Amino acid sequence: MRGTFLSEEDAENRSLELGCKGIHKNKDKWMPCKNEKELHIYLRK
């Protein structure tokens, strides 16, 4: 799945690229931004 990472560090780096803050966990993977709703907002920019 696009946008999911095995490491917290990779998700943090993607957050910085997108311009959002924080990361969140989805099952056993890490995702950028503080939640999925915010992630989708930044992906549309």
Image (spheres, rainbow, N blue to C red):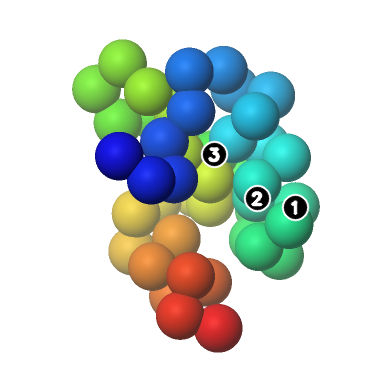
Q: Nearer the viewer, residue 13 or 34?
A: 13
The reply, left or right, for residue 12 in relation to residue 7 is right
Q: Quadrant of the C terminus?
A: bottom right
Q: Which residue is outermost to the front?
A: 2
Residue depicted at 34% across the width and 54% down the height: 36
Q: Nearer the viewer, residue 1 or 12?
A: 1
Q: Residues within 10 Å of mark 2 (few under 14, many from 20)?
A: many
The answer to whether mark 1 and mark 2 are in CB contact below 8 A is yes
**Position in image of residue 9 (x %, y %):** 69, 24
Q: Is residue 42 above or below residue 45?
A: above
The amino acid beneath tag 2 is Ser
Residue depicted at 75% across the width and 52% down the height: 16
Nearer to us of marks 2 and 3 is 2
The amino acid beneath tag 1 is Leu
The reply, left or right, for residue 26 in relation to residue 11 is left
The reply, left or right, for residue 17 in relation to residue 6 is right
**Position in image of residue 13 (x %, y %):** 73, 40
Residue depicted at 54% across the width and 39% down the height: 23
Q: Quadrant of the N terminus?
A: top left
Q: Is residue 42 above or below residue 36?
A: below
Secondary structure at badge 1 equals: helix
Q: Which residue corresponds to mark 2?
A: 15
- The image's mark for residue 34 is none
Total number of numbered discs in the rendering: 3
Q: Which residue corresponds to mark 3?
A: 23
Badge 2 or badge 3: first in the primary sequence: 2
Q: Is residue 32 above or below residue 29?
A: below
Q: Which residue corresponds to mark 1?
A: 16
Badge 3 or badge 1: first in the primary sequence: 1
The amino acid beneath tag 3 is Ile
The answer to whether mark 2 and mark 3 are in CB contact below 8 A is yes
Q: Which residue is outermost to the left?
A: 27
